[in-house]
Amino acid sequence: MLVPWTSILVYTFFSFFWGQNGLYAQKHLEAECLRLSENQAKLEHTSKDIRKTKDNLMRDDDALSVYVRQLDYGRGGDEKFVRIKGLGIALNNTPSAGQVFYAAAPDFVPDITIKLISISFGLVVLLFFLIRDFLPWRGLP
């Protein structure tokens, strides 16, 4: 009876720690969830920045002229450029729209591998008992 129980115990142990729903896969999923929530926060911040820039460009003529001149659409002639400070849009870099993140599949040991390992442990225990039964004992009976 020890052989099947050994196989069951090994299968349970490996499944609990490294199986598809095991602790290792759970930790991996938690890390992916944290990474995705951080990315979502960055996207929300970028969205707010883009909305502020859009509102500035739609409602403020001075901000619009600064942005147009920054893109080299200024009028020719003797036009003088005036730098307006404090608008927050006169940056040379435009905010990116964000990155697309896909949740990675969790790392785990496949169930067939766990079954093979547990059967192997059961066979090792069986082999140990067979060898023990057929070898003469030296020592106490």
Image (cartoon, rainbow, N blue to C red):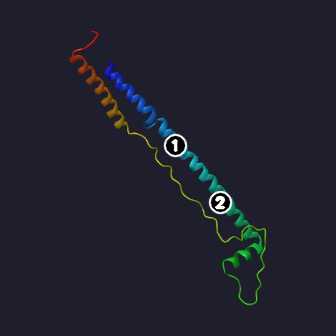
Considering every residue shown, the one lying at the far bottom of the view is 77
Q: Is residue 40 left or right of residue 135?
A: right
Measured from the top left, where is residue 84 in percent x and y?
78, 74
Helix, strand or loop under label 1: helix
Hey, which quadrant is residue 108 in on the image? top left
Mark 2 highlights which residue?
46
Picture coordinates of residue 99 (x, y %)? 56, 59
Residue 118's place in the image compared with 105, above or below, is above
Residue positioned 56% across, 45% down in the render: 33
Name above or below for residue 76 compared with residue 44.
below
User: Given this view, does label 1 or label 2 mark the residue nearer the observer?
Assistant: 1
Q: Looking at the image, which is closer to me, 57 or 21?
A: 21
Q: CA distance from mark 1 to mark 2?
A: 26 Å
Residue 110 at what x, y percent from top left?
38, 39
**Residue at mark 1:** 29
Which mark, residue 68?
none
83 vs 133: above or below:
below
Determine whether, in the image, residue 113 is placed left or right of residue 26.
left
Q: Amino acid at mark 1?
A: Leu
Give the position of the N terminus as an image quadrant: top left
Residue 13, position as x, y percentages in the image: 42, 29
In what element is the residue under mark 2?
helix
Q: How many other residues sit within 10 Å of disc 1, few (<14), some (14-19) or many (≥20)?
A: some
Residue in the image at 78% along x and 68% along y: 86
Tell me whether the residue at label 1 lies in contact with that at label 2, contact meaning CB atoms closer than 8 angstroms: no
| Horizontal side, residue 96 vs residue 75: left or right | left
Corner quadrant of residue 6: top left
